[in-house]
Amino acid sequence: MTGLALSGGGARGSYQVGCYMALKKCHIRFDGYVGTSIGSFNAAMLAAGQDKELKKFWETINVGKVIGFSEEYLKKIEKNKKHNNLINHIFNNAKDIIKNKGFKTDGLYNIIKEFNLENKIRSSHKDYGLVTVKAKSFKPIYKYIEDIPENKLNDYIMASCYLPVFKMQKLIDDNYYLDGGFKDNAPVKMLIDKGYNLIYEVDLEAIGFRRKVDIKDQKKIIKITPSHNLKSILNTNQEDLKYNIKLGYYDTLKKIKKLDGYKYIFYVYSEDFYKYISRKVNKKILKEMEILFNTKNIKVIVIKALELVMQLNKYEYTKIYSPWLVIRKIKKLNHKRGVYKFILELKVI
């Protein structure tokens, strides 16, 4: 069986949508989904067969409204896209936050409710699970859909997403719950314990505890993580969320198709190709590159040299590049110092 495990990470959850799109493009199908915090919501949407709706949700979501930002603050965000961090909001709305004992949760709960996920998941024949934490005992609670009472799924998803910045309220069985990330922010072990033999894990690398997985079980896991910064877990900038989706898509393609690159993504060319194009590089310049990149592997040297220049020239991260086309383009800049000088000596048609 093949499963998908999605970690928590607030607004970074948009990245997971792009990852799923790439996995789907690679014809990977899942028997089950588990998640923590926002990962539990994303996993529920996917288990319910709502992947298109999930993508639209992240492309149009108003994060500020969902987590209870004031209308006045949201208008400021709209006027000034740079004015979009949580610290500003806390200072500007301190009185309301103290009065309410945290951010309101109505927006988040209503979103979960409107998708009618419970009926769709129960009839999907897919495994679905989540993790939350009971506040009083501070113990993790792991639940699969079959363990959740009828009409209670929305409450459990809400419990899994419950950050301490939210207004505390009793959710299930007259108890308080906390975000599942406090105990297990990437619940791959849920799938391992259920007998899954291949697990794709999308870890947003947000703060949270991660349960250890036995060495023998680590071989079952294909882990996908962001190659670049996804910014705040409470980021309200819509363009950043769309970028996260795109980054997740290309990071996943790189992982699944085993493409080349470290900070960028390149189509795969053989070692012989890199040896051939560097055959006439001045030995002194080559030695400088070996020292700079701390390797004698010519393929690694060329790729890292290209990436350094690409960063300086602000190339897009969310794209797959042909190394020889990039070399040709950099050569046209005709810069003759440092890494540029090395690239100028590479021989491509």
Image: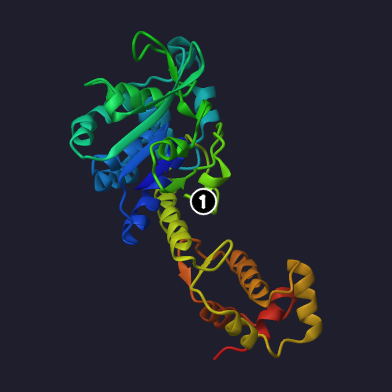
Q: Where residue 317 sits: x, y (%)? A: 50, 61
Is residue 280 found left or right of 67 in the rendered image?
Answer: right
State the colouring used for the structure image.
rainbow
Q: Secondary structure at mark 1?
A: loop
Check the image and report above or below for 142 versus 347: above
Residue topped by disc 1: 219
Is residue 198 found left or right of 89 in the rendered image?
Answer: left
Which residue does the image show at 47% across and 49% down from the upper left? Answer: 220
Which residue does the image show at 56% across and 34% down from the upper left? Answer: 207
Q: Where residue 24 sits: x, y (%)? A: 32, 56
Q: Where residue 318 sits: x, y (%)? A: 46, 61
Neighbour tally class for label 1: few under 14, some 14-19, many 20 plus, Cα within 10 Å: few
| Amino acid on which disc 1 is placed | Lys
Give 249 or 239, whichever is nearer the viewer.
249
Check the image and report above or below for 237 versus 73: below
Give 78 or 339, whichever is nearer the viewer.
339
Is residue 99 something that shows in the picture?
Answer: yes
Is residue 222 found left or right of 328 in the rendered image?
Answer: left
Image quadrant assignment for residue 192: top left
Which residue does the image show at 54% across and 77% down from the upper left? Answer: 323
Single out the residue that lies furthest toward the top.
Answer: 174
Is residue 147 found left or right of 268 in the rendered image?
Answer: left
Which residue does the image show at 51% across and 16% down from the upper left? Answer: 138
Give 74 or 313, whichever is nearer the viewer.
313
Give 329 or 218, whichever is nearer the viewer.
218
Is residue 7 something that shows in the picture?
Answer: no
Q: Where residue 181 sits: x, y (%)? A: 50, 29
Check the image and report above or below for 209 versus 60: above
